[in-house]
Structures are given as C-alpha cells and as structure tokens.
Amino acid sequence: MKKMNKKTKALMKTLTTENVAVIHAAFEDTPRTVAFVEVDKLMSDGGKCETAFMLTNSIDDAWYTGDKVNYIGPDKACRSTSVGDFVLVGKTKYECKSAGWSKV
C-alpha cells in the first residue's frame, strides 16, 4: 500500500474535519475564545459540542496541550470548559448547560 504524502494528508484532513471555537464566559468578565478544536465534519452539532467539551477538560493531562486542540488563550494555563461556556460551530453558538447544549 502506498503511503500518502504530507500534502495529500493535509487535503484529506480538510475534507473530513473542521474546527470549532471554544469560548470561555462562565467565570470571566468578558467572553474569550480560548481554543479551536478539531472535530469530525460529519458529526451532528451536538456531537461537535460534546467533543469540544471533552477535549477542553483536563483529566489525565492539561487539555490545552492536546493534539486536536489549538490553544489560543492569553495565559500559559487554562481552566476546563464548564457550564455557561460556549462552542461556536460554523455560525451557530451553543451554550453548555448542566445537561447538554442550548442554541444561543
């Protein structure tokens, strides 16, 4: 089987994945985008929100060092995503609730 070159891999990645923005607002004075998270393009918006939530919560390691996360926060460290924070999928913003997500 022939290996894909870097350009082909990058093209395949753009066809199958997208980035969603994670916005921390629950404990901040002003909402702030802290990361872009890579998700599967074919997932539902709810699935994309859940994936972003999972990937921006520290469990075994600091979430902002993950492979599928592009951390853009202003500090060297960042809290985990919580109830009251947002995920932007395309042009639609979702708020994290205690159970699930609500379109804003």
Image: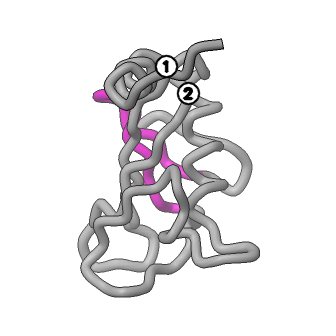
Q: Looking at the image, is 16 positioned above or below residue 34?
A: above
* Residue bounds of the magenta highlight: 84-96
Q: Quadrant of the C terminus?
A: top left
Residue 38 falls left or right of residue 72: right
Q: Looking at the image, is 20 positioned above or below residue 35?
A: above
Residue wearing tag 2: 40
Which residue is at the front of the view, 96 or 1? 1
Q: Looking at the image, is 51 positioned above or below residue 3?
A: below
Residue wearing tag 1: 16
Residue 99: give its label: none
Name the residue located 56 percent from the left edge and 40 percent from the top edge.
49
Which residue is at the front of the view, 1 or 83? 1
Residue 50 falls left or right of residue 45: right
Circle 2 or circle 1, nearest the eye: 1
Q: Quadrant of residue 18?
A: top left
Name the residue located 50 percent from the left edge and 61 percent from the top edge.
84
- C-beta proximity under 8 Å, tags 2 and 1: yes
Position in image of residue 77 (x %, y %): 43, 85
Q: Amino acid at mark 2?
A: Asp
Name the residue located 47 percent from the left edge and 60 percent from the top edge.
85
